[in-house]
Amino acid sequence: MNNGLSYGLPGIDSNQLQDFGRSQDYGRASMRPPGPAMNGGMPSANDMSGIGGNAMSPISSMRPSMRPTGLGGGGEGGWMDGIGGMEGLKSIGSGLQAAGNIYMAFQNNKLAKEQFSFQKDAYRTNLENESKSYNTNLAGNAKAAMGFEGKSQSEIDSYVNKNRI
């Protein structure tokens, strides 16, 4: 029934349109478009009924020996299934990371030993040079001071030998 009003849509009753857009109707159309009614909206990818009859998946129609294997998806005995799927792959990754960490620890330890050896050699060289410098200055200062006081060379040598490093 059109009640004499025309909204430019043939065959639609004005009573069907009067509540359209109210908050209680939000998300629900009060009228359906022409065509076959769909229960629950769009069909899923697994439910192909109504689209050309009973369509079968191309993989499900294959013999088991022809089904693809590989990353464990769909086939029987893929290598990914053999390691336990994604959890197994994560475990392998964790193991590789641990092995890498151990290798890096050994490399860092080797580098630290080399660095320590270099620092030890540099310290010894510096200590020897400082000792020679101190002893040279000690002998020169003792000779100057004790010679000024009139002490003999044997007394100066005795003092230097007693106080040298």
Image: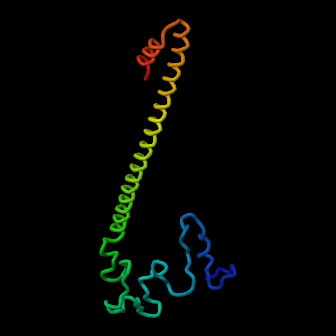
Q: Viewed as shown, does residue 106 lie left or right of 25?
A: left
Q: Where is residue 117 shown, x and y percent of the image? A: 42, 43
Question: What residue do we see at 41% from left, 83% from top?
Answer: 46
Q: How many marks?
A: 0
Question: What residue do we see at 49% from left, 27% from top?
Answer: 132
The N terminus - image quarter? bottom right
Q: Where is residue 28 shown, x and y percent of the image? A: 53, 71
Q: Where is residue 5 shown, x and y percent of the image? A: 68, 79
**Residue placed most toward the observer, 8 or 100:** 100
Does 117 appear above or below 58?
above
**Residue placed most toward the observer, 3 or 71:** 71
Q: How is the image coloured?
A: rainbow
**Which residue of the protein is positioned furthest toward the top in this rendering?**
149
**Residue placed most toward the observer, 13 or 69:** 69
Question: What residue do we see at 47% from left, 36% from top?
Answer: 125
Q: In terms of image quadrants, where is residue 98? A: bottom left
Does 57 appear above or below 102?
below
**Residue placed most toward the observer, 124 or 161:** 161
Does 94 appear above or below 6?
above
Q: In terms of image quadrants, where is residue 161? A: top left
Q: In terms of image quadrants, where is residue 75? A: bottom left
The C terminus - image quarter? top left
